[in-house]
Amino acid sequence: MPLRFDFVVLGGGVAGLSFALKAAEHGQVAVLTKRSRDECNTHYAQGGIASVLAADDTFESHIEDTLTAGAGLCHRDAVEVTVREGPAAVRELAALGADFARRRGGELELGREGGHSKRRIVHSGDITGREVERVLLSACDDQKNITFFPDTTAIDLVRDRQSSHGQGRVLGAYALTPAGKIETYLGRVTVLATGGAGKVYLYTTNPDVATGDGVAMAYRAGAPIANMEFYQFHPTCLYHPEAKSFLVSEALRGEGGKLRLRSGETFMERYHALGALAPRDVVARAIDAELKRTGDESVFLDMTHLGRTFLMERFPNIYAACKAFNVDMAVQPIPVVPAAHYMCGGVVSDLDGRTGCPGLYAIGEVACTGLHGANRLASNSLLEGLVFGARAARAGAEEAKGGAPSPGGVPDWDAGAAGDSDESVVVSHNWDELRRLMWNYVGIVRTGKRLMRARRRLDLLREEIREYYWRFKVTRDVVELRNIADVAHLVVECATRRKESRGLHCTLDYPERDDHNWLRDTVVSREP
Ligand code: FAD
Ligand code: SIN
């Protein structure tokens, strides 16, 4: 028997929880999370939330910085609503109890990050995401209309193929429960808040849940997907064989951290007038170029001039993590390299989170609202999750109230003749091969030839995964592998189509930006 709700929310990060909190005023909400309730990109966010809160800051300045970072592809309307609705969203979070850093007088202490012309990053030291997640979860727990389903993996969206009035509408999702059963979760409105897909690359700042499930499910359901070529690489992750790409926040450069080569020489001034605080795409490419030129394995982020007391107070989490890997940042520069960090593209959605599939909304990192264009400005994504979570809840509540059909006769999941797998090793091998080929051929700098090579290998892998998927019983590993393969396909497809270099997409075959032909999104969709 299907489980029925008014709102089915896939994902419990900043976007999903912001939606759930508001939607709960209008009906029953189910929140599905793939692992524990708080395991998500949001939990790991360090730097903070960008918003216009200082007396000397203006909306125009934040808008301009966002547009500049986005390299011509931001949708101005999405930028405007995010920036203008940002301060109220941040204040609301503070009113819920978020413990943001404050000055002695009580006003918010604001940090600075790359691409921002002002100090405007609200933060909780260097564990801002953990605080945001804590506060939102605790507020959701006070709401009787919200039910959490942890360790529950959505596999595919349910679409109406039967009723004459709602044909094509998304009715909910099939999901794998902790007991290994596949249940049907039905809602008047279904929300993708599944976050990013960093795991598509070998090295990433993202946790294991970030396998692009939402984009892959939406693509298979026929929703338009855009701008997947713009995968953001964060310039500074701790370089250590056991550090699993631990992020070293951009806020360190905001406080005066210097990027140096092994020789001690600084280099960012050769690449951009803003030096180490240039937009992320510029810094990541500069590091990539310097590593290739020198043959070194990392560059270095030097904080030693700032003193141990300040570093321990302002960046306690990063200080401790570096220390655990025998790097004392108070006396030695931190070895850093770039790693995949943020998906600027995603499921095409409007200013209220509506996608191309009726009944389906997309919010947060999974969505492509047009806010980020070809390159996201630092700390704009927690903000986007807050603002669009609330906007989508308003629109979704209206839709649910306005007679969005309560789904009727939906077929249960059909497992067909699938049996238990006797060769799970295929999954781990394909997983590794895929992430490695994306890193090697579809990384920071691309060429048409490398993209072709990636495409050929991906086609084979996708075929093998498809076969495996239908032959054996569904497991979370297989669901994720299938999704990562679909996401990789979308990144390669979009990157191949874009015949220019812009923002995060850099190809040696077309090194210049071409506004005449390419001042537009790359949109891909397939028949459901
Ligand atoms: P997430 O927070 O990633 O949540 C996704 C949710 O979806 C999870 O609950 C997951 O379990 C669930 N899910 C996924 N697939 C399924 C499925 N198939 N079925 C059920 N549930 C599923 N941004 C900033 O603005 N400021 C920062 O300082 C900052 N620092 C960052 C530092 C790090 C290390 C990282 C990784 C990111 C950082 N970002 C930062 C980016 C930002 O954290 C994310 O973009 C943002 O938190 C995404 O929120 P979300 O709600 O869209 O997704
Ligand atoms: C960071 O703290 O450097 C991450 C900020 C972001 O990804 O927006």
Image (cartoon, rainbow, N blue to C red):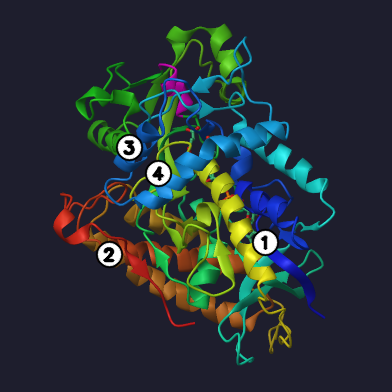
Which of pointers 2 and 1 lies earlier in the amino acid sequence? 1
Circle 1: residue type: Val
Which of pointers 2 and 3 lies earlier in the amino acid sequence? 3
Q: Is residue 116 magenta?
A: no
- The residue range painted magenta reads 250-256
For the residues labelled 2 and 3, the Cα–Cα distance comes to 29 Å
Q: Secondary structure at mark 1?
A: strand
Q: Secondary structure at mark 4?
A: loop
Residue, disc 4? 376
For the residues labelled 2 and 4, the Cα–Cα distance comes to 21 Å
Circle 3: residue type: Glu
Tell me the mark number nearer the camera, choosing from 1 and 3.
3
Rendered view: 72 above or below 26: above
Q: Which of 418/85 is in front? A: 85
Residue drawn where x is 41% and y is 22% of the image: 301
Residue, disc 3? 64
Circle 4: residue type: Arg
